[in-house]
Image (tube, rainbow, N blue to C red):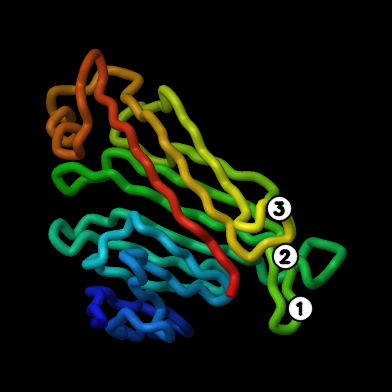
Amino acid sequence: MKKFLTAVLSLTMFHSQVFIPIYAEKEQHEKEVSKETVLDFNEFQYVSEHIAEDSVISYSFDGETETYTIMDPHTNEVTDIISVTTPMYSTNSNSNVHTAFLTADKIISGKGETVVKLRFTASVEKYSSGSFRSINALNYTTVGIVASMTDMEFKSKESHARPKTGGYPTTDLSWSYTVYVATSGTVSVALAPYFVSAGFSKTNYFYKIINDAGTFRLY
């Protein structure tokens, strides 16, 4: 049975917007397969089990970067932002090779405010010729804190990015991370309720273990 995903595609092009309901079908911008959410980009797909099936999802494109914004329909809080950036012009001597930046943001909120925003980024070399595409190399990956309510740091961090084939070239790049994120300074009495609401625990500081994972694949 096909399940309706409560999602809205907001496509911005030439200063106009189109809002289209998204259904769990192959030809749509996203679908659910075995509890996985699939987001369709121009050349990539993003597959994740970490996105709730009732999420509200919007899409935008600015000429170089395609972005999906995922929102919790119950709290109206943004939980994830997934983007693919491919510069229009190749800096590689081979015009068929472009550097693509694959990004997944995880936003942890409490009481309607962002407590911490984490970002996974992978830089890859994408080859395309006609209908053929491949990821020829992984340049680097990073996991970092890009925004936080107060000073925060990683107490520990483990991340992986692996091609499906075990080597390159490949069409699938799977990634995951587990981080132990904690406050690194004094948290005021006024801010403490936001951390509690966001599911942080407290010893001498507030802390939370956060996991995220997904797969970027060419199609």
Query: Which of pointers 2 and 3 indicates the residue nearer the eye?
Result: 3
Which amino acid type is marked by label 2?
A: His
| Mark closer to the chain start, 2 or 3 | 2
**Residue 73 coordinates in the image, percent (x, y):** 18, 64
Of 19 and 40, nearer the camera is 40
| Mark closer to the chain start, 1 or 3 | 1
**Residue 15 coordinates in the image, percent (x, y):** 43, 82
User: Which residue extends farthest top?
Assistant: 204
Gap in angstroms between the C-alphas marked 2 and 3: 19 Å
Of 172 and 21, nearer the camera is 172
Gap in angstroms between the C-alphas marked 1 and 2: 11 Å
* Secondary-structure class at tag 3: loop
| Mark closer to the chain start, 1 or 2 | 2
Q: Residue at x 68, y 62 (%)?
A: 170
The residue that disc 2 covers is 98
* Secondary-structure class at tag 2: strand
Image quarter hosting the C terminus: bottom right
